[in-house]
Image (tube, rainbow, N blue to C red):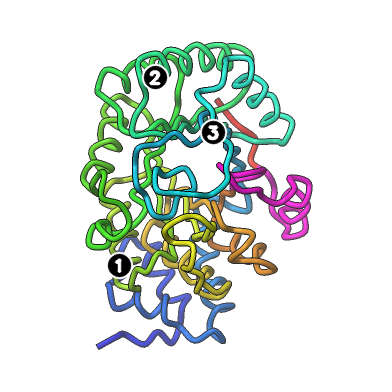
Amino acid sequence: MQTTITNWNELADKVLQGDSITKEEGLSILQADDEQVLPLMNAAFKIRQHYYQKKVKLNMILNAKSGLCPEDCGYCSQSINSTAPIEKYTLLEKDELLKGAQKALDMKVGTYCIVASGRGPTPKEVDQVIDAVTEIKDTMPLKICACLGILSDEQAVRLKQAGVDRYNHNINTSKSNYGNITTTHTYDDRVDTVETAKAAGMSPCSGIIVGMGEKDEEIIEMAEGLKALDADSIPVNFLNAIPGTLLEKYNYLTPMKCLKVLALMRFINPSKEIRISGGREVNLRSLQPLGLYAANSIFIGDYLTTEGQQGSKDHQMIEDMGFEIEVCAL
């Protein structure tokens, strides 16, 4: 039987004392009446404030290689099965990667994310990324996150030695739902890559995409899976159902549901960076600011093949909420 929560702050206190919430308590969060969302977010903020005060981390993506991907991920406009009209290009030259880093600095970003489509990087692509990262780290106060797909042990070590601080490889969905989303790689392939990055000394970044037909129990499974991975940074994406993708008709998320998911992630992974990521603008809509009561990080600027909110509006949102941008400390 599902647990009925009468005091969300008591549940937050339980988490702050070092206890984990139960599956039943997780379901209570995800299935709470909408009238309970404000007290729920207040309780999530109690945890968030304990670890991060009122600071917000900014991250920016550069789509360094677009399309040309052999994987069949149903949510992705760059998938081999996608007919979405996107730009397709090979890995950008060093100058373009450096320009992206400068843009990140100009937007008050702390972590610059170099993302490339594909199953995994070629030796030449790893060399290109390393060449650019080496110069960025020598000249700019930025943390670097790379997201290049499945890595070998050697590639991971080389990226770390070049100065890559963090490696992103999302689990995306639950293990039990994985076969419904992609067939060209497995959930375990994703987990193995995160472990490879960790073993090389890079900070692990791994997150989810909500809105792909998963059950509430599976959202809890994802959150628990990331806890088991000990991911330092957890991007929470909300499906932006792009025409031409296999999941183009999946459009059932509400802003209230998205807030409950963010609260759940904070309760299950209390000390971790929870980042509101892709689909933020189209799914949270006018309730975007409330997400910051649970999350302490956002992407700013555009995503991979979709546009984001203007950076100036994000800066204003953070200021209006009484939060402050966290300056990158290397």
Kind of element beneath mark 1:
helix
Point out which mark residue 159 bears: 2
Point out which mark residue 88 bears: 3
**Sequence order check, earlier mark of 1 and 2:** 2
**Dot 1 amino acid type:** Glu
**Residue drawn 52% across and 61% down?**
241
In front here: 6 or 93? 93
Point out which mark residue 218 bears: 1
**Dot 3 amino acid type:** Lys
Give the quadrant of residue 26: bottom left
Q: Quadrant of the N terminus?
A: bottom left
In front here: 74 or 254? 74
> Residue 312 magenta-drawn?
yes
**Residue drawn 63% across and 15% down?**
95
**Residue drawn 63% across and 41% down?**
326
Image location (x, y in percent) of residue 48: 52, 58
In front here: 165 or 102? 102
User: Is 191 drawn above or below residue 210 in the view shown?
Assistant: above
Kind of element beneath mark 3:
loop
Question: In this image, 317 relative to 18: left or right?
Answer: right
Q: Which residues are magenta?
A: 299-325
